[in-house]
Amino acid sequence: MDIYRRISVWCINNTRTQFWILCGLILTALIVRLKFFVGVGYNDDCAYLSLAHNVLTGINPLGYSWYSVRVGTYFPTALIWKVFGISEFTDSLYYLLCSVGGVYIIYLLGKTLFNIETGLIAATLLAFFPADVTYSTQIGPNIPLCAMFSLSLLLYIKAYKQENYKLYALLSGIFLGISYLCYEMLVLLLPVPILYSVLNSGKSLKKTLTILCLVIVGFLFIMSTRVIYFYSMTGKWFYGEKLIEETLKADKNINANFRMYPDALFNLNPNYDSWDAQHLFGISYYILILSLIYLIASRSFNKDTLFLTAYLVGVFLIFQYLIYYAAVSMEHPFWNCKHTRYLLVLLLPTILLISQAVHRLRNRLVQAAVMLLFILSSLYYIDKDCTFLRRGMDYVRESTYLLQRMHPRKIYIPDGWTHDRFKAFSNFDKNFLGRTVVYQKSKIEDIKDGYVLTDVNPYNFVVWHDFPDFMRNPPSQWILLNTINIKNIGIFNKFKPKIFYAPRSTDLPPAK
């Protein structure tokens, strides 16, 4: 044991060894994310891809609900496409880079707040964390928001710890602004740096005020650039804020299920009957509770540990209760949707608290056992989640590929959701997309001499009344060409998309 401890200490204290350990962790994180590649999902992924395609082709992207104001989420994708072309891999490349970059950022945060070993443990945990891996190749604002906010917070903390703090503070404000460009949810995280200032201002009130002022200057620089860009495209000042307000007022989605987030964090939902019921957090929050108990019992609960705990609990309470009661208390109740992916913003304090507790363990074998338990359990849940999601979208993916290879005819598809995914999986092939017709509100006599795709959208099971009866009961003269049967679990195992050929005449009655 003494030899093991000496080797461990030497590795941590040797700068070159630290570098190679960190490179190994970043490479491991990349390999894990590529191994469990998900790609385009069933949520808002295609909205961002369509916006990126508009940017790439010179079309004004603004105006598509609030998605269009999140330029930090889709502009980088357009740039990547410009350089590397459009493919399912390049669709996800920006989000993959943000996720892998987050591994390095959390290492620096652990090192800055505590020590090098805590930073390396944190990087290891994030490399295998189920939620981060699962969303690392999906298209959406959550991973970029987490990466940019983590970088802003790192620079903010460094401003307090460095003599030359002004540059750090200004850069922190700039990345805070970039975070807002990715996702306006950032406003819910603004109490976090303020909390750090309250706990660390001490007698240096002048320094604290200077840091806050420079952060505000950096933030406003990015925001003013955004406002001017939107004005140049629309002729309207504060276009983004007005569009967000209009979208919030129009969406009355109020979710009062207060068990949803605790169930997600503690992995208490045993099934996959909802496409949002993935097991994104594994056993991490059970380990977190034990970590907090250990840190308190071992008298290792210092000011930085208190900051992370308050960060974790405070942001959770904001998402769990404050948003809901703020929404329903307004004169016109507005949007308060709940999704487990929103809780990705809790990963940073969660991982750092666990890492500090693991670092404090005196017995190296126990330390290694905890790490191994976390990694193996995480890989189990990553495999289940990513397989569930990837195969779930395989219904649309395979439908697209099959129809692309068929004789060119009109292609009748159920709805706009399916059409958006056809765009992504065909790499925005104009010739292919030009043949697609949405039949959601069509009559059977409108469908002639073309292919008809049914049961490809999981949302159909929620809104069957929005679709014509022929999707369930196709006419007897329609010729079944293919049934897409993919083994999966939960909601994605409940339907099998079919491709029919509808001849020119559809006078016969539907099959019973």
Image: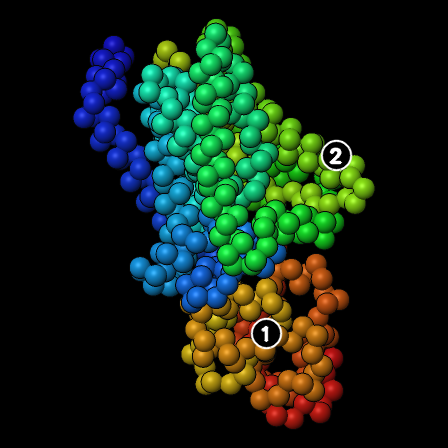
Residue 325: mark: 2
Q: Viewed as shown, does residue 190 lie left or right of 132?
A: right
The 10 Å Cα crowd at callout 1, few under 14, some 14 to 19, many 20 or more, is many
Which residue: 37% across, 21% down?
A: 165
Give SS at disc 2.
helix
In primary-sequence order, the first of circles 2 and 1 is 2
Which residue: 53% across, 44% down?
A: 183
Occupied quadrant, residue 279: top right
Residue for badge 1:
413
Occupied quadrant, residue 322: top right
Question: Which residue occupies the foreground of this view, 379 or 458?
Answer: 458
Which residue: 48% across, 71% down?
A: 400
Q: Are marks 2 and 1 in contact (CB under 8 Å)?
A: no
Q: Is residue 10 above or below residue 440?
A: above
Residue 295 shows in this picture: no
Question: Which residue occupies the foreground of this view, 250 or 292?
Answer: 250
**Whole-percent x and y of residue 326?**
73, 35
Residue 463 shows in this picture: yes
Q: Is residue 118 above or below residue 65?
A: above
The coloring applied to the image is: rainbow
Occupied quadrant, residue 39: bottom left
